[in-house]
Image (cartoon, rainbow, N blue to C red):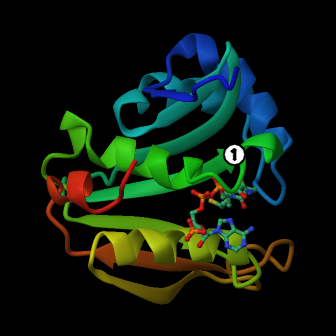
């Protein structure tokens, strides 16, 4: 029998498993376990965890931008290989947008490298389903900010949208 994937907000007890999942999802940067624990506690209500039969298969970390309650920043999206291509990343973002913590949110920000086409396609799809625009501007530059160690990151700005529209827009 096919087991159902459940999406929840993470808790501190998920921090270690989240760290392991991210390590298996290149090209994502691995943060420290401590950083993942903070995401799972301080930023729990703006993050999502997907699990099936006790196994963690997806994670999205996000937070409301300091000083701007209308904007959620999506930090990382990770889906285990076995669970890809089924709408899970999209559904986790939708789950976050439908949380009470996002009731004032009208814009979603994230950053993407030019090379990460799956990520770009994911956020393009989210903007289409939210029936809004997606704009892209340079944010962190390879030479200036990463001293040539990492590719440039571009700021993606999706919005405006009404947070209640997340119900109707990004479908679960
Ligand atoms: C990118 C990633 C999160 C997508 O997860 P997923 O659950 O397979 O994505 P979804 O099924 O929700 O896809 C939603 C949309 O994104 C697009 N998409 C997702 N993966 C894609 C891929 N490999 N190639 C092209 N488009 C892709 C599709 O347009 C899809 O829309 P569709 O339903 O019309 O096909 C997953 O591949 C992953 O964890 N990759 C490694 C880590 C990473 O790059 N994270 C993103 C950076 S934040």
Q: Residue at x 57, y 47 (%)?
A: 88
Q: Is residue 52 left or right of residue 87?
A: right
Query: Image quadrant of ligand 1?
Result: bottom right
Rendered residue at 34%/31% (across/down) = 45
x and y, in percent, of residue 165 in the image: 18, 59
SS class of the residue under badge 1?
Answer: strand
55 vs 20, nearest the viewer: 55
Q: Sort mark 1 into few (<14), some (14-19) or many (20+) by Cα contacts within 10 Å.
A: many
Quarter residue 2 falls in: top right
How many numbered callouts?
1
Q: Residue furthest front?
A: 1
Asked if residue 68 shows in the view, the reply is no
Residue 106 vertical position relative to residue 45 in the rendered view, above or below: below
Residue at 72% over, 43% down? 83
x, y (%) of residue 15?
64, 21
Horizontal side of residue 109 vs 110, given as left or right: left
Whole-percent x, y for residue 108 in the image: 35, 64
Query: Against 90, is 128 above or below?
Result: below
Residue placed under numbered mark 1 in the picture: 79
Percent across and percent down for residue 47 are: 45, 37
């Amino acid at each position: 029998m096919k087991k159902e994937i459940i999406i929840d907000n993470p808790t501190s007890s998920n921090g270690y498993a989240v760290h392991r999942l991210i390590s298996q999802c290149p090209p994502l940067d691995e943060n420290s376990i401590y950083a993942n624990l903070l995401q799972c506690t301080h930023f729990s209500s703006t993050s999502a965890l997907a699990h099936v039969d006790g196994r963690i298969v997806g994670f999205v970390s996000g937070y409301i931008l300091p000083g701007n309650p209308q904007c959620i920043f999506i930090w990382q999206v990770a889906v285990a290989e076995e669970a890809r291509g089924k709408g899970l990343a999209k559904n986790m973002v939708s789950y976050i947008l439908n949380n009470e913590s996002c009731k004032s949110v009208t814009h979603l920000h994230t950053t993407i490298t030019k090379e990460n086409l799956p990520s770009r396609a994911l956020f393009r799809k989210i903007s289409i389903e939210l029936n809004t625009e997606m704009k892209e501007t340079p944010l962190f530059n390879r030479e200036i900010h990463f001293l040539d160690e990492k590719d440039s990151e571009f700021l993606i700005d999706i919005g405006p949208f009404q947070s209640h529209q997340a119900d109707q827009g990004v479908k679960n």
